[in-house]
Amino acid sequence: MNNFVIAGNWKMNTNIETTISIIKNVAEQVDQLNEVKSTIVICPPFTNIYVAAQEAKKSKHNIQVGAQNCHFEESGAFTGEISLDMIKSLNCDYVIVGHSERRAYFNETNADINKKLKAVLKNNLKVILCIGETLEDRQSHKTFDVLETQLNGCLQDIVENDMKNIIIAYEPVWAIGTGVSAKTEEIEEAHNWLRNYCEKKYANAGKTVALLYGGSLNDKNAPEILNVSNVNGGLIGGASLVPEKFVSIIKTAESLSK
């Protein structure tokens, strides 16, 4: 893949005012670029998706908006949950499923994530599927066993044609929000393994699946990480809340695309 996917996961941060301010700032800086090949995605909290989409439309470049989670049922007595129909009505393009914080804090299983992933695809939206090992897994040399188990479970019944709407984000849990990023050789090893997995399971579609790195990617380490083999972009946390840092990562991606 020549073009990158640069996605910002804002987690439980920002209100409506700050959402408008950040996206406006990002759009103004991105619009100063002559051409933008990268896919830019911003995933704010549910409460801010509508205004985020409205503000993103003002950019001359295609800034897209995603949700951080969803429920797999179409509707029903699920107090506090958000359906795909609700998300679609807010002009969303993407949905993140399987983030490590959802797995750890809300006990989401691979089976749960598989249901959500299928529901997202059924609603003609794109998926950012998160996978990754804990520090204990890595120290026990179980990284690839864990990744394989997660992928097999989350992608159960998913066929080759579905993969055009799926992005996989590798996020080593021990490097999320810690300020510690994996070493480039660790990232390369993981992403090469993921590419091999996708190609074996999904043939030609597996060759073009975007593989994002999601472990404390920021404006400082982006040049090194985005230059790693089979890293096709990033799922960015804290740095995506600071327009200058987020745009810096986009500019790095653009420079590597040429």
Image (cartoon, grey):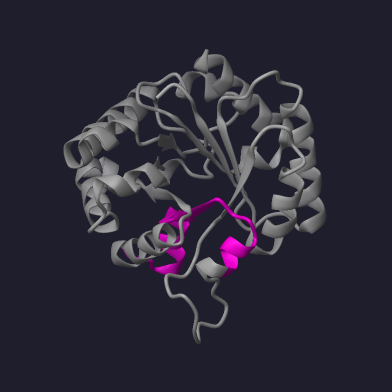
Q: Where's the N terminus, which quadrant?
A: top left
Q: Nearer the viewer, residue 115 or 144?
A: 115
Q: Is residue 119 magenta?
A: no
For image coordinates 38% across by 66% down, the residue present is 108
Q: Position of residue 188 (x, y in %)?
A: 33, 25
- 191 sits left or right of 149 in the view: right
Q: Is residue 97 magenta?
A: yes
- 130 sits left or right of 238 in the view: left
| Quarter location, residue 243 | top right
For image coordinates 39% across by 23% down, the residue present is 184
- Report the span colored magenta: 86-109
Q: Position of residue 5 (x, y in %)?
A: 51, 34
For image coordinates 30% across by 61% down, the residue present is 110
For image coordinates 22% across by 53% down, the residue present is 152
Q: Position of residue 71 (x, y in %)?
A: 47, 70
Q: Position of residue 176 (x, y in %)?
A: 48, 44
Does residue 32 sit above or below 214 in this rendering? Answer: above
